[in-house]
Image: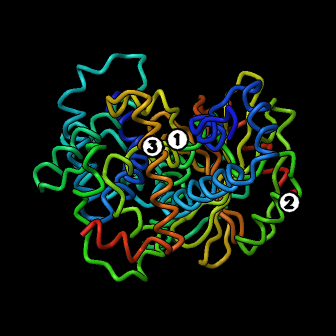
Amino acid sequence: MESAEIVAHIPRLRRYARALAGDNHRADDLVQDTLERALAKFYLWRRGSDLRAWLFTIMHNVFINQLKARRELALDDGVEEGLQSAPQSDPLELRDLDAALTLLPAGQREVLLLVALEQLTYAEVSKVLSIPVGTVMSRLSRGRERLRALMSGAATATNLKVVK
Amino acid sequence: MSDLSVTDLHAYTDGQLDDARRVQVEARLAHDSAATESVRVWREQNEALRALYSPVLNEPVPQRLLAARALRGRWPYYALAAGAMGLGFGLGWMSQSYRTDRFVEAAALPRRAAVAYAVYAPEVRHPVEVGADQQDHLVKWLSKRLGHELKAPVLKQRGFDLVGGRLLPGGKGPVAQFMYQDAMGQRITLYVSLSDAEPRDTAFRFSQEDKVAVFYWIDGKLGYALSGEMDRASLLAIATVVYRQLNP
């Protein structure tokens, strides 16, 4: 019965993962690992608490571990501008939202997507990602401004050098 | 920006301010074009992200994601059996010889409808794209996008008011979802898809998709699925009203 409740959340987990991972196959790997872990740890879920938030928390942890494994972790706000491993992109591609999103540091991307796609409150985002609300706000702010610059094309040339 | 903080601006953008603070922020925005522009751009970003990724919600879930040991067998991924066992309820029943693709298409309807219900019915802030206050616009817009005239049934007699509707990606083009709510906050959805197969009619069929009960039928070019988390008899009573209104 409970696992059927998890199944009902799969479409949302897939949507978030697709935006987060920027690649369909990688996104479904992320969902699959999240589901496996959620089922293994289901006894830890407190009945009555928000199952969706719990699943997104697990996905966040799986995602971070995958980034660490690929040495792509660029979560720390202090160094995120320099560490992001952006793919070599043609500046023209940056007009694509999909491509622009992959150029945001993972921490900013997570916050922006949880707010924009999942419409979580800032307090919920703080809980899911285990970061203070102040950090949620600063990542949201920087993520949005970065995306704005990328989409407007103004910052593409210089930013590409920075993120290299 | 006077005492308009960046946090206020974001919270305003995302609809996360209480009414009193929202009014204050709006008053200040009227004199701050840079801040107003930021809010506009950020809202566009939110909408663009939703437009880009929300179609994922209606993609069929890959088998491998449902193959996890504990999930297997719990969810009627192959709703074929459920569809095949659906009984005729005497409304416009016509015997039909199904080809396999038809069969699959018919079986996919309740599952897609139930998933769309499960995703949007619990939504507090954005259950619909266009609200019932713009009902004419809603129906015209959805009719235009589906390429077929639609009607939003009136379910007042069963205690349900129209909340609004949204456009969703279906298996073969756009799908319309109308949402209704009763005084207790219980929601039901009417999922309408256009079939490119030959027009035909079927009886009511019933499918229990996990907690969501679905009555579905095909009427000419349109496939309908009424979904709700309620018992079969209550849902059937509503489905009957819907059917009669659509076929006066």
- Give SS at disc 3: helix
Question: What residue is at 60 percent from the left and 38 percent from the top?
Answer: B121
Answer yes or no: are tags 2 and 1 on the same subunit.
yes
Question: What residue is at 18 percent from the left and 51 percent from the top?
Answer: A67
Q: Nearer the viewer, mark 2 or mark 1?
A: 2
* Observer-nearest of B35 and B151: B35
Q: Are marks 1 and 3 in contact (CB under 8 Å)?
A: no
Q: Position of residue B161 (x, y in %)?
A: 81, 36
Does residue B137 appear anywhere in the picture? yes
Q: Nearer the viewer, mark 1 or mark 3?
A: 3
The label on residue A48 is none
Residue flagged by tag 3: what amino acid is it? Leu
Say which residue label 1 marks. B118
Image coloring type: rainbow
Answer yes or no: are tags 1 and 3 on the same subunit.
no
The label on residue A114 is 3
Q: Nearer the viewer, mark 3 or mark 2?
A: 3
Label 1 resides on the chain identified as B
User: Is B3 rendered above or below residue B207?
Assistant: above
Question: What residue is at 61 percent from the left and 35 percent from the top?
Answer: B5
Say which residue label 2 marks. B137
Give the left or right position of residue B153, taking residue B9 as reference: right
